[in-house]
Amino acid sequence: MNPILLIANDELRFWRRSKLAWTVLTTLVVVSVCAAFVSNTEVSRRAQERLAQQAEADAIFQAQPDRHPHRMVHYGHYVYRTASPLAVIDSGINSMVGTSIFLEGHRQNTATFASARETGLLSRFGNFSPAFALQSLVPLLLIICGFASVTREKENKTLYQLIGQGIGNTSLLLGKSLALWSLALLALIPLIALGLSATGADIFDFRQSLGGLTFGYLLYLSIWVLLIVGVSALVRTSTQSLSVLLGVWIVSVVLMPRVAGAYANAAAPSPTQIETNLRLAETMRSGGDSHDIEDSAFMDLRERTLAEYNVESIEELPFNYRGFVALRGEEADTEVLNQFAEERMVRELEQKRVADSFSALSPIIAMRAFSMALTGTALQDHHHFLRAAEDYRYDMVQSFNRLQMTGMTLADDLARNTDAESGRRTRLDAAAWREMPVFELQPLSHAQRWQAASQAGFIMVLWLLVAFGLLLFAGRRLQA
Amino acid sequence: MNLSYRLQQEFEFLLKSKAIISVLLLLLAIAGVSVVLGLNYVDQERQQIAELIQLDAEERAYKRTLAVDYGGAAYDAFHAVWNEPSELAFAAIGQRDLNPTMMRIRALALEGQIYETDSVNPELALTGRFDYSFVAAYLLPLVIIFLFYDLIAAEREGGRLSLLEVTAQNSRSLWIPRIFLRLLSVLLAMLIPLWFGIIVEGTAIGIALQASFAIALQIILWSTLVLLVATRPNFRSETVASISIGVWVVLTLVVPITGKVYIESMVPGIKGAEVSLVQREAVNDAWDLPISDTMDAFYASHPEWSDSPPITGVWHWKWYYAFQQVGDETAAELSRGYRETMIERDQITANIAWISPAVAIQRKLEGLAETNLDASLAFEDQVRSYHEQIRRAYYPVLFREVPFSNERLAQIEISDFSPTQELGDD
């Protein structure tokens, strides 16, 4: 028998007799299954909720009576974000962001009402999901199972015998690692099962991500396995081994992610919402008020339009000039709004980049980034939703502005509040909003998700190499 | 052997133990960093508030110069409101970043304005804050576990236990000085940074003492837990450590996270989004309703203006503000429900705190620091009554249909928001 397998087999046999190992195994199974179950119920409950809310919002919107189209621009519409099917594995930022946006003319609203505020204090303790179990708890369980894997042999003076039997140091450590690794494989089962049973749109695309995700978690747990056995081989006593490994776990799992966040907030601070709003209001002021066709900001446009159509006055234009100003005004407003929105997204990504650079100090930061990117619950997915909602908003508003432009005369439009007959003529058939396409969020593709995850994946590979180097180094130093 | 001799002996012993000293220094450093970051955060918030107040006044003054009617003037007049961080906020920033802390409100329907929160980076918010209360809730127990897990087993495994027990008069005089010194040193490592912050901020002494007491209690609780395990005969130090860490994982991670799931499924409650949806619907529908419907509803709750002249045209500012107010009134019940949902969830959290010291200490510190739900709701109340004040300031000119003049407009004075003073009486 291969010496590596022999050692692994020996270690597994030891665990079978050890009460501690059985406790760890039971905990592992209970935690993984609970996490999978809880996460599944929660995600499907939320998905149902959102589907219902979106359906209701669509129904209310479509049931609006005949109206002046600009009233619909202000009436607006709600869109809800559907969670990615793999959110059952890693809910990522979902609880920290609002799931609905109110879309209306002249402004971009933010996604309000993150569930974190509504839940209160406890929302900050994390989410009970397979991702949390695999990232935080499983390494701890592996530590408890493996910290004594080599020190035990030293303390019991059995290391002599093993080495005396001609088993090489490296084979010994690899064998110990293999035993621990089998436990890590066990921990991955709920993730795979849950991922495979997930349903939703583009599920095939998500299956590909699931493959990458499983591989990533395997990589991450392998780093821990090698680290645990390496440390156990380097130190003299089991107590030392446990202290060192627990210290590593606390610093890398509990402390580092928060330090990274705090540092990113301090290093790349973001202006307050009010400050941004004031700045935005100032920029938009120069764009003029598109409700008022006499606004000086639109005089240029009037000249150009009159020249283009070769007419003397706006009444002679072949369309309702008021609708035309609304259309152009929205176009200009949106340009400014998008510029501010992009600025904010870039800043958020920059903060994320700063925080992610701490993955050089802790593999969990790389793992989190990798996991959220592949499950479609990362910052970039939220930005993707914001952009999709904005595109939908712009199309909706402009289609109503176009209706205003072509569906009525300027005279009627100007007299709509004073003359009942004009008011009636400017009220357009509700078919326009009944037939508007509903909002459908096309998630980022697997290729896009993979691209976002690749850097974190690369860092994990580096970590694995470092951990393997540590193991080899420990093997060289290991003396009976 | 008298007590002071034993203490001195143990003190020397403690100084010699490199591992313990370095862990204590690490705790001191981490707690210190958390306090400095917290002070920094609070400072930044105060600066933002100061800037907000200044910008707000300038912008409002500028907008007034453009006014052509009272309704338009009210429409453009935003007023800053803010929730000043308390003198202990540096230690427990809590949910401040997710709750509304500063905004600008105007005489329009409040339900559409009051939930405006600052834009946080969701990915950074996800990890939770690195503040002093985090150190106390998460790291402190781990340090205590480290200090006590091999208290007895280390001596036993080193083969010194029986010797020690023979030389000591009784086991009390053997262990109590050691335990006492370790407790004292960990308490100092936690309190020195806290009191640094307290002195910088000038926190009220009562609050400072309560916070310190909470920390001491947390230390006693965890050391008792660990010692209960550590003093079990024949437990090896690794076993003590594994069990203690297991307890820590359950109490600090598993219980709160399970509690969160429990809360969300037990109290599905009313979502904030529903409130704003209803309010928005009500305001929007008003445009299509006969003007008299809105005015009747408004006069029912504001009878003092019911003798205002009837509206003849299709548009009047007083109608506009009336339907804004009716929108708020329509959503009022849901809004209360939303509030109650959060209160109810907070109460369950209070119950969970009984089984999770991590939740307990964070709740306690956030309560003292006024960064908890109660403080957030109190702020909301202040904003509500301030909004009432703004609204009512414009009603006389709107409902008496006073002809517009800049002189009359200048007489409409709304005092600045004051976060401490009680505003209004309703």
Image (tube, helix red, strand yellow):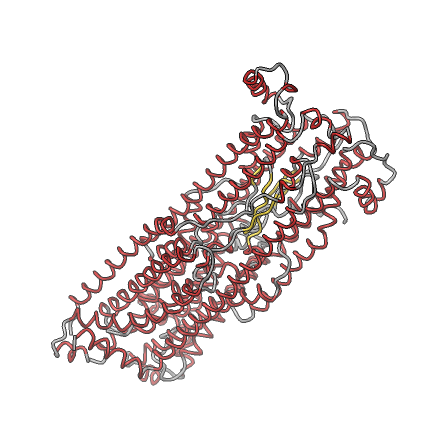
Q: Nearer the viewer, residue A242 or B113?
A: B113
Viewer-proximal residue among B114 and B274:
B274
Q: Position of residue B63 (x, y in %)?
A: 65, 29
In this view, A216 is above or below B220: above
Please name whichever residue, A100 or B45, is drawn nearer the observer in this view of the structure: A100
Please, which residue is most extreme toward the right here? B307
Quadrant of the snapshot with the N terminus of chain B: bottom left
Residue A125 makes an appearance in the image: yes
* Vertical order, B280 against A45 (above or below): above
State left or right for residue B310 relative to residue A443.
right
Left or right: where B202 falls relative to B391: left
Residue B29 seen in the figure: no
Left or right: residue A475 compared with residue B195: left
Say left or right for A438 vs A466: right
Which quadrant holds residue A433? top right
Pinpoint residue B124: horizontal percent, then vertical percent: 45, 51
Front one among A272 and B261: B261
Does B94 sit above or below residue B172? above
- How many dots with numbers? 0
Query: Measuring 64% from the left and 26% from the top, which residue is drawn there?
Result: A322
In the rendered image, residue A288, in percent from the top left (x then y), is placed at: 59, 26
Q: Position of residue A467 (x, y in %)?
A: 25, 61
